[in-house]
Image (cartoon, rainbow, N blue to C red):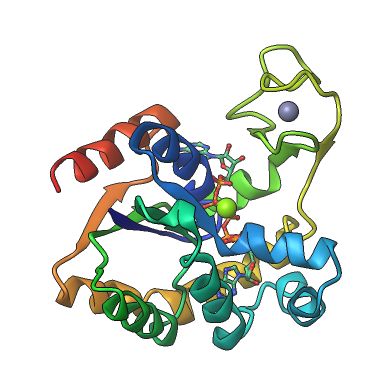
Amino acid sequence: MIIILLGPPGAGKGTQAIRIMESHGLVQLSTGDMLRAAVAAETEVGKKAKEFMAAGKLVTDEIVVGIIADRIEEDDCKGGFLLDGFPRTVAQAEALGQLLDDKGLKVDAVVEMKVNDESLVDRITGRYTCADCNKGYHDTNLKPQKAGVCDGCGSTNFTRRADDNRETVTSRLATYHAQTTPLLPFYEAQGVLRTIDGMADIDDVTVQINDVLNAL
Ligand code: AP5
Ligand code: MG
Ligand code: ZN
């Protein structure tokens, strides 16, 4: 199964991807996570991507398509994968279609997570993650059971993303509306678009996504 999670910054793509990965045995492919790892490791890709990411702009299609083309060749992708944050332009969607076509594969469903812009700013500025196991939290929506201690691994070290400030969020949202929303009619025309209510609480969103996947 090949699934795309499509939605603005803070829609809950990463939060849900981890849950679906566990329940459906799909690998999460997050271009954002891969690019952040490249920036941290100061690779050639990371050096090119860093400024675009800090400005809330998209990294070039060439870079992200290259990353995905390599990644889907790996063994763990054979059982299917869940794309989180890719594609983000029509050119990326066309390139993905070609890559899959060459392997006799296709996108099974594109799940659009619809959320109001105002809520997204709160979600993103409140987000933080465990520095050791990467488990995600939110200042008010999703706190660890014991304050200051990660539920997953017991660590007390947490980090916030460099692009999770109010100014960059505004720019990321504008980028989404200008460059990524054209994917909605693109996938609708292919009959694979499914829209869910991303404003619902986290568990309810998981139920909605499971309903979509179980109906395939
Ligand atoms: P990326 O890492 O993909 O960031 P994004 O799209 O901006 O999305 P986020 O990761 O911020 O949000 P999310 O939807 O995963 O939300 P989350 O689950 O964490 O990309 C970063 C940058 O990399 C881009 O700006 C670009 O520069 C570059 N890039 C990446 N891919 C690219 C591509 N294909 N092409 C070009 N450039 C690319 O949830 C957010 C918060 O809300 C959390 O705290 C969570 O706890 C909370 N939350 C989640 N769901 C709910 C809910 N239902 N109710 C209440 N709170 C909730
Ligand atoms: Mg994410
Ligand atoms: Zn942890």
Which residue is at a point 49% across and 50% down the rendered structure image? 28
Which residue is at a point 24% across and 77% down the rendered structure image? 185
Task: Judge by depth and name the residue closer to the eye, 88 or 1.
Answer: 1
Is 50 drawn above or below residue 33 in the view shown?
Answer: below
Task: Judge by depth and name the residue closer to the eye, 157 or 115.
Answer: 157
Image position, residue 205 (x, y; %): 35, 37
Image position, residue 138 (x, y; %): 65, 34
Left/right of residue 85 with respect to residue 209 in the rendered view: right
Give the residue at the far front of this rendering: 75
Tally of numbered tags: 0
Task: Judge by depth and name the residue closer to the eye, 122 or 195.
Answer: 195
Left/right of residue 155 with respect to residue 67 in the rendered view: right
Image position, residue 54 (x, y; %): 77, 71
Image position, residue 108 (x, y; %): 23, 60
Which residue is at a point 38% across and 45% down the rendered structure image? 198
Quadrant hosting ligand 3: top right
